[in-house]
Image (tube, rainbow, N blue to C red):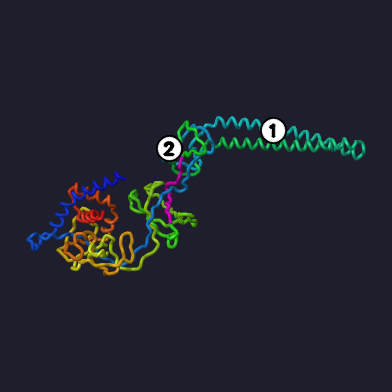
């Protein structure tokens, strides 16, 4: 992926060029009444974002990759070899069960059917002759039996007539078998002829068209894929370890950048009980309704399966966790001074918000007892403590002063949801439009130092 790496390096260079003057303005301009150090230079006080730690339990979840498939999705193949004469549908067309999709050339099969029907007529006529002969010989045998009982016919003559009767019966049976064989041939040709009209096996939407007029197709030629796109299923792979705690009916969340409304919630519909002998994994399926046709068959999505809750503890956002470079200890920066007011609500990314006067922050090591997608349960903090979520790299390794902007959990989770590339694009767009967001800048600085 050389092109991808080059593109990422270009974005990082552009980000650095954009952020450097902004961060200097941020840490310098936010100090307002800058304090002077011993060197006579103004002391630069950084700005950080803080959120209140809270008490609660974390939902335990397993994040997996899912593959979207249409309900009753089938691939359509011809059942006879012939040339395509008509194609009556296009990609994306909705069809009914039994609707004609393709007409194959049936000239050759019609001729074969005529020959089979002629053979059937011949066999039927021969069968009638055999039956007539059998009836004649049977009558002759009946008369010969009466004569033999009166000793009016020799034993030799009687045996000859009796043998002819047995042969006539065998001929009649053979002729009838030939009729049945010819009838089977006619039925087979009629069935083959009917297969030159290719119909939809289910109601659904047509896609993956591989049929054009004039093509010669056979039983290995895939013509269409048909599926019910209103109702989809998402397939995920479960390992044997996951089967210890993942069960049917558990809540799942399906997310994708292609979903304009965020996520789809649905229960886990079914789990196959048969594991692959080599990978020791199995498939699970989630039935979902395709709202606004936002999902397409073959699309990859992210699936979170929720299977329980952790023990109750103090919760902090994942972005608050920071590894102290001096001690390699994981912890959080906690505000040791009082902060007035509750976190701002409905802050948008274009608002700088209000900053507090300089307050003291201290690095506090924590024990992580559970980790979720957005937050972690820790020991070592009290619910209600203000913890830094953005700007830890500006505070040093143990303690420092900074101006704080209080935010709510929704704001933090929205930023954590941003992908790296999304965040870089957002920073660049806002710089080009003349807007500045300290939170985005702080998070981008952290991303830059970790890449």
**What residue is rendered at 49% in x and 33% in y?**
216
In percent of width and height, residue 301 lies at: 37, 51
The kind of secondary structure element at disc 1 is helix
Q: Is residue 358 left or right of residue 314?
A: left
Where does label 2 land, which residue? 90
The kind of secondary structure element at disc 2 is loop
Boundaries of the magenta span: 224-238
- In which image quadrant can residue 190 be found? top right
Magenta-colored stretch includes residue 237: yes
Rendered position, 349 above or below 314: above
Rendered position, 244 above or below 107: below
In percent of width and height, residue 47 lies at: 17, 59
Residue 238 can be seen in this image: yes
- In which image quadrant can residue 438 be found? bottom left
Q: Residues within 10 Å of mark 2 (few under 14, many from 20)?
A: some
Q: Which of the numbered marks, if any, corresponds to residue 123? A: 1
Q: Quadrant of the N terminus?
A: top left
Closer mark to the observer between disc 1 and disc 2 = 1
Q: Is residue 382 left or right of residue 96?
A: left
């Amino acid at each position: 992926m050389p092109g991808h790496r080059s593109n990422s390096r270009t974005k990082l260079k552009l980000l650095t060029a954009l952020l450097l003057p902004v961060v200097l303005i941020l840490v310098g301009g936010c100090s307002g009444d800058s304090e002077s150090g011993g060197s006579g230079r103004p002391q630069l006080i950084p700005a950080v974002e803080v959120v209140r730690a809270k008490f609660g339990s974390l939902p335990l979840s397993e994040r997996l990759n899912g593959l979207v498939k249409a309900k009753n999705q089938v691939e359509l193949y011809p059942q006879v070899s012939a040339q395509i004469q008509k194609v009556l549908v296009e990609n994306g067309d909705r069809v009914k069960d039994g609707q004609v999709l393709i007409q194959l050339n049936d000239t050759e099969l019609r001729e074969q059917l005529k020959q089979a029907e002629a053979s059937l007529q011949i066999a039927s006529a021969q069968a009638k002759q055999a039956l007539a002969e059998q009836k004649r010989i049977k009558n002759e045998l009946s008369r010969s039996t009466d004569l033999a009982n009166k000793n009016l016919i020799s034993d030799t003559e009687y045996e000859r007539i009796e043998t002819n009767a047995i042969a006539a019966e065998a001929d009649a049976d053979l002729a009838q078998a030939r009729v049945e064989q010819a009838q089977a041939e006619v039925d087979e040709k009629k069935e083959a002829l009917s297969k030159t009209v290719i119909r939809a096996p289910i109601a659904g939407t047509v896609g993956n068209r591989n049929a054009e007029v004039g093509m010669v197709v056979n039983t290995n030629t895939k013509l269409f894929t048909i599926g019910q796109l209103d109702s989809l299923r998402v397939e995920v792979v479960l390992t044997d370890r996951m089967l210890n705690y993942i069960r049917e009916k558990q809540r799942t969340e399906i997310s994708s950048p292609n979903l304009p409304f965020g996520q789809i919630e649905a229960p886990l519909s079914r789990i196959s009980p048969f594991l692959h002998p080599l990978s020791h994994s199995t498939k699970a399926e989630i039935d979902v309704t395709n709202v606004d046709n936002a999902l397409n068959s073959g699309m990859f999505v992210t699936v979170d399966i929720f299977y329980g809750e952790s023990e109750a503890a103090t919760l902090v956002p994942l972005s608050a966790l920071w590894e102290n470079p001096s001690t390699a200890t994981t912890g959080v920066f906690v505000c040791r001074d009082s902060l007035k007011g509750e976190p701002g609500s409905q802050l948008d990314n274009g608002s700088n918000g209000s900053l507090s006067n300089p307050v003291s922050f201290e690095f506090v090591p924590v024990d992580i007892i559970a980790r979720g997608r957005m937050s972690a349960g820790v020991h070592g903090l009290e619910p209600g403590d203000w913890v830094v979520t953005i700007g830890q790299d500006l505070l040093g390794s143990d303690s420092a002063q900074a101006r704080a902007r209080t935010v709510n959990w929704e704001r933090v989770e929205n930023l954590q949801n941003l992908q790296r590339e999304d965040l870089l694009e957002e920073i660049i767009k806002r710089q080009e439009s003349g807007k500045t967001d300290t939170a985005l800048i702080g998070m981008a600085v952290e991303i830059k130092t970790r890449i």
